[in-house]
Amino acid sequence: MRVKMRTLMAGPSGVVKPGDVIQVSSEYGAELIAGRFAIAVDACERVETMSEQPAETAMRKRGRPRNTIE
């Protein structure tokens, strides 16, 4: 089973960062998903295709600087 990690996981076999996709056994994958430490790759791909729009950013309009000294 392939899962995409949501959290950092470290152990004797190494370090897995959030966002990494790893291959694990079905039992271990189910435990990671139940604990909300990872999501199944198939579910992850569906979510990513829905959120491909760029995020909105707030921009401050810049006008002409005020002349306070007269």
Image (cartoon, rainbow, N blue to C red):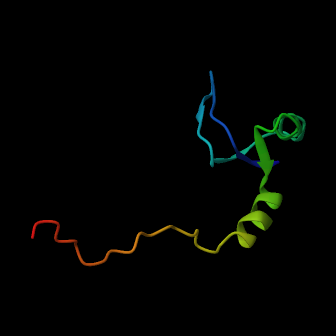
What residue appears at the point 81 percent right and 36 percent down from the top-left corner?
Answer: 32
Q: In which quadrant is the C terminus drawn?
A: bottom left
Q: Is residue 33 above or below residue 57?
A: above
Expressed as whole percent of the image width and height from the top left, the position of residue 52 reads: 65, 72
Image quadrant assignment for residue 65? bottom left
* 3 or 1: nearer the viewer: 3
Q: Is residue 67 left or right of residue 62?
A: left
Direction from residue 16 to residue 33 in the image, left or right: right
Q: Please provide percent x and percent y for residue 53.
A: 63, 75
- From this viewpoint, which residue is outermost toward the top? 12
Quadrant housing residue 30: top right
Q: Residue at x 11, y 66 (%)?
A: 69
How many badges with numbers are in the image? 0
Q: Residue furthest bottom?
A: 64
The image shows residue 8, relative to residue 38, as above or below, that is above
Q: Position of residue 29 (x, y in %)?
A: 83, 40
Q: Residue furthest front?
A: 70
Name the image quarter holding residue 36: top right
Q: Residue furthest left?
A: 70
Q: Residue at x 73, y 72 (%)?
A: 49
Please tell me which residue is depicted at 58% across the width and 72% down the height of the picture.
54
